[in-house]
Image (cartoon, rainbow, N blue to C red):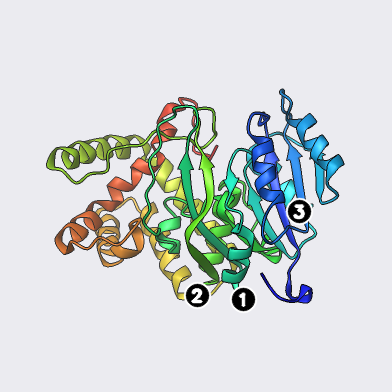
Amino acid sequence: MPSSSTTIPRISVVMCTYNGATYLAEQMESLLHQSLLPYEIIIQDDGSKDQTAEIATEYAQRYDIVQFYRHTGTPGINRNFFSAMHRASGELIAICDQDDIWELDKLETQVAALGDKLLVGGISRPFATDGTAVSFDSRVPNIDLLRMMYVGMMPGHTQLFRRELLNRLPENTFFMYDLQTQAYAAAAESIAYVPRVVVNQRRHLSAATYNAPTDRSHSIGNIVRSACESLRIYKALRPNIRNRFAQWEDFLTKTKLDTPVVHDALRMARLQQSRTLWGWLRLTAFCIKHRHRLFHARETRSLLAILRGAFFPISCATYYKYLLKDAKYKGTAP
């Protein structure tokens, strides 16, 4: 911990709740026992029907640093989090989920790692106490912007960032709040990472972000099955993928950031929107060339890496397979 109080930044922990009574108290205890205590803990509820509000109110009455609010706008995860984050008065904001458990040195570790960057993340380790299936990928993830454009690599509950980042974000209603913050920091080449567990993420079937573990082994049978499944999903979701990358082009253009990684990201976004064979071939070549910036972790087998890069324009569709479950999906993010 910093030796002088003058060097300690004010940290606002922002938590949004919805029917989280079962696990909220356990998470609150991990926040209140941090080795570097937050300046304030903001809890904002999105219309819970259980005892969440009562528990949050009790903590606000017991601890001066805890503030409890009810979200009065249109319900939804994005709207609730953005509204709550704008209540923060600290120089730094740490996002918090209602049902996780933080490592007790999370804030201290991340503040030390942040340096002069805009945002810092860390590893999230899943666990379950109700028998829900979980799997833990202990590899340090790829936090390149090109990768983030396909799938978020730094979940909100692992992020700590400077409050000024909120004011820099372009207006956007398509992407989730935590994807916007990490993408902007990566685009600005102002992102840091703690390569160790900072959050224990509780997995249960009712969690908004829960997905069952899948077999990721590189057996011949699994590769064939995965390729066929990717083709099926790609055919169904190609218009949605074009729309997603049109949104990325708009987002990145509005940042007005002039960095090499933004130039590459804009090129990829435009290639993903192409409807010509030449555009497809150029996208494939781009993915092969930048393959190590697109995969979750570096592929050490050279031939397999090239093959994966060549197939990536199709295999990337599997990141959006959740859209197939919504028959009413009209091309906008949930």
Q: What residue type is labelled 1?
A: Asp
Comes first in the chain, label 3 or label 2 = 3
82 with respect to 106 (left or right): right
Front of the two marks 3 and 1: 1
Q: Which of 299 and 115 is in front in this view?
A: 115
Where residue 321 appears, as percent x and y from the top left, is 38, 36
Q: Nearer the viewer, residue 262 or 147?
A: 147
Read off the residue under disc 1: 116
Work out how far the residue at label 3 is from the one at label 1, CA to CA, in angstroms. Answer: 22 Å
286 with respect to 145 (left or right): left
Where residue 316 appears, as percent x and y from the top left, is 33, 47
SS under mark 1: loop
Indicate the quadrant containing the C terminus: top left, top right, bottom left or bottom right. top right
Q: Residue 86 carries which label?
A: 3
Read off the residue under disc 2: 259
Q: Residues within 10 Å of mark 3 (few under 14, many from 20)?
A: few
Q: Nearer the viewer, residue 197 or 208?
A: 197
